[in-house]
Amino acid sequence: ICCSGFTGENCMQAVCQTQCRNGGLCTGPNKWDACSCDPGWGGKDCNEATCGDGCMHGGVCVSVDGQAICQCLPGWKGASCEQAHCDPECKKGSRCEPHNVCVCPKGFTGADC
């Protein structure tokens, strides 16, 4: 028979008052915030998506199919929303700058070069 807060063979597995989710493990008995979370998860029960490097430019970390990813605002892309994204896409080897601005190479003009 295990003491309160423990279960399993040899009573070595702690039981948390909240269920640890997304692969999290209970690390202390009878506590609300004793979950050790897998990478990409946080919060007291490992149910909050956390993106490793954070999300830039107003992006929000969300869970999609069990993976923590940055959901970028329009005009941004990349794993951390770090790259400007132009629509329409810049052409002729130009580069996209924030606020949907294509920087055109010499001899090209227009919204998308």
Image: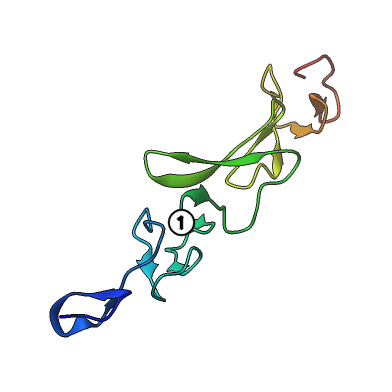
Residue pointed to by mark 1? 46
Tag 1: residue type?
Answer: Cys
Task: Look at 69% across and 25% down and name the residue there.
Answer: 74
- Residue 77 place in picture, x, y as percent: 63, 36
Drawn side of residue 101 relative to residue 79, left or right: right
Judging depth in this view, the residue of 54 and 101 nearest the camera is 54
Drawn side of residue 55 relative to residue 1, left or right: right
Drawn side of residue 14 relative to residue 45, left or right: left
- Residue 55 place in picture, x, y as percent: 66, 47
- Residue 17 place in picture, x, y as percent: 40, 62
Point out the residue furthest to the bottom here: 10
Judging depth in this view, the residue of 37 and 20 nearest the camera is 20
Drawn side of residue 44 relative to residue 108, left or right: left
Judging depth in this view, the residue of 10 and 68 nearest the camera is 10
Task: Look at 81% across and 33% down and name the residue there.
Answer: 98
Q: Quadrant of the C terminus?
A: top right
Colour scheme employed for the rendering of this structure? rainbow
Instruction: Give the total of numbered labels.
Output: 1
Circle 1: element type: loop
In the depicted structure, whether residue 27 falls above or below residue 73: below
Estimate how packed mark 1 is, as few (under 14), some (14 to 19) or many (20 or more) residues with alpha carbons within 10 Å: many
In the depicted structure, whether residue 35 falls above or below residue 18: below
Judging depth in this view, the residue of 22 and 105 nearest the camera is 22
Q: Identify the image quadrant of residue 97.
A: top right
Task: Look at 37% across and 69% down and name the residue there.
Answer: 26
Task: Look at 69% across and 33% down and name the residue there.
Answer: 76
Q: Quadrant of the N terminus?
A: bottom left
- Residue 35 place in picture, x, y as percent: 44, 66
